[in-house]
Image (spheres, rainbow, N blue to C red):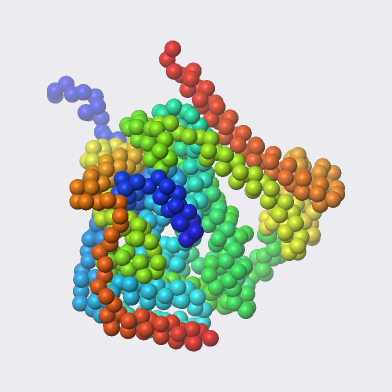
Amino acid sequence: MAPLWGWASSRLKKTLRARRVPLLALCAAFSFVIMMFNVPIPGGTTGHAVGAVLVAILVGPWAAVIAVSLALIVQALVFGDGGITAIGANCLTMAVIMPLSGWWTFRLLAGKAPLGSRVRWFAAGAAGYVGLNTAALVTALLFGIQPAVAHDAAGTPLYCPFGLNIAVPVMMAEHLLLFGFVEAAVTGFAVAYLDRAEPGLYAADTSGRAPGEPSVRRPLRKLWWVLTALLLLTPLGLFVPRWLGAGSAWGEWGAEEIQELLGFVPAGMRRVGKFWKAPIPDYSAPGGGEGSWLLQASWYLGSAAVGVALLLGVLLVARWILARTERHAEPA
Amino acid sequence: MPNLPEWLIKPPPQTVFDPHVGAPRRGRFVRRALGEFAGLLAGPFMQRDDSGRSGLLQELDPRAKALGLLGLIVLTTWLATWRALALDALICLVLVALSGIKLRRLAGIWLAVPLFSALLVIPATLNLIIPGEVLLPLWHTGQGRWGPWVMPDAVGVTDAGLEAGARFVTRSLLCVTLALILARTTRPDRLFRGLRALGVPKIFVMLLTMMERYVVVLVRSAEEIHLVKLSRTITPGSLRQEQAWVAAGAGSLFRRSRSLGNAVYLAMLSRGFTGDVHLLEEARFRLADAAFIAAAGAACAALLAVEG
């Protein structure tokens, strides 16, 4: 985390005027307090939102990194919440990954939508959902790799005992199905309220832009670079398991692998398996030919590009529909 | 009989708020939040009696405490043998005695932390997660298969699972105790200044100190926002309306934070703030501070020796 805090500080120093110092401290206090707000959730119980994406939308991503980090550090140091030795991991997920991924999602979806438009509210809600789930996924990965990297001579885990096969599904199920929507509701409704109550609020002091004029291109260009880098890295998923002698990912077995593992294919799986044939099975050329590694890597890259394009397409189509219905709803 | 309107004759709906029987389920989040705010205002930020009590640890320089206790916390997370954990527990007890912290404050934590950690780790004691010799068989799975999952013949608690679980709970308890000793014997502003000894930049320490000061102000604002809601609620709204209210409350709090930030900046300017960060310097290290660091170092060395 130290290099990331250093990077965030240097980004802030470029624009950090003396005026921003108390504002940043107040933003950190604000982050701390909104984590204590109880949000009603279905079933009559309550949950808490992290609010990191909201802070990023309001004060900019790098200021949010510092503000949410400070809130988490105070929670750990003064209240013992979260643990002192877990400060680094907590800050990485909740104070870096969550605000940055949420902020990029917001910028991508909100574009140049006018203040007060439903597109911005939708974008803020989607950003809260994406930000929280990205952070949850990284947390699950951090939990899940612990039994593999920290165990005693007998193989008994020294820290988190749950591997990736348990940590990822459990964490993601609750965040994708429940807590993600809580975060989305708080982020979306808060932006809707502030758009109406104080439109001049988004002064984006970190960038020096004029109020209400979000600069979309520069951060998005970076997002495209990151996405391209991730796409180029996808063939690693093809080769690394082979080098390490690993089988398929846990729970992602096909009928043939189940046959090998169990000696039979459960009747339900055999029946359901007939209904869906993947357009690009196993991310490889149709027909399942092995081919050269270059061909396989190309298919992997192509599959990743198709997946990313589909996901972005769904979000952008939803945004377009909202913008269109809003235009039609406007009085003539 | 007077001609009363129909709405007055009809019995009230079940969801009507009655302060004597508690809020309806959907409206409880306001009371819960108020309880948490009250807990925070009564907690470490405001109640500093432990840090003000006379005790050996209270009189130490915060830099010495931060170095010594954070070193012990980091080492505790690394301990795996029971002998080393027992020695660590003994060190914790000595530190508690030296700090003069009221034991009833620690008792709640000593009950809550093992309970919470145990709940988290209970599934890991089964041979589904950590294989080992089954000490307590819970149920037999018959053919040893459950859908696509290969199951052991008998699912039960294993010796290795129990040991890993107990180690996890003990280590959590020790770490939390050490963290509480640090927090309870040092005022937050001094604790943050003590972080300078660990190389934390001045600007971060200044932000932490300012934040600690204004958290209390913002919590009071949040308390007011919730009290206003509570005092004006007869029947709670739909889930969406209530969520929108919480979000608007957060938005409103941000507006207050921003205006307060601007006011604080003007107050700082009027007192000669030029943008340079100056912190109140701690007094020089005394012999007792150096002795504490040496003792903490010796404790760490002893723990490492016992751990092997």
Choose top left, top right, bottom left or bottom right for residue B10.
top left
Q: Residue furthest top?
A: A332
Q: Is residue A189 above or below residue B77?
A: above
Choose top left, top right, bottom left or bottom right for residue A237.
bottom right
Q: Is residue A9 above or below residue B255?
A: below
Pick the quarter of the image with the C terminus of chain A: top left
Question: In percent of the image, x 44 and y 86: which residue is there?
Answer: B302
- For the question of whether residue A7 can be seen, the reply is yes
Choose top left, top right, bottom left or bottom right for residue B53.
bottom left
Question: In percent of the image, x 59 and y 63: which residue is there?
Answer: A145
Q: Is residue B138 above or below residue B304?
A: above
- Position of residue A91 measured from the top left corner of the image (x, y, whole percent): 45, 57
- Position of residue A310 measured from the top left corner of the image (x, y, whole percent): 65, 36
Which sits in the foreground, A152 or A5?
A5
* Mark count: 0
- Position of residue B137 measured from the top left corner of the image (x, y, whole percent): 59, 73
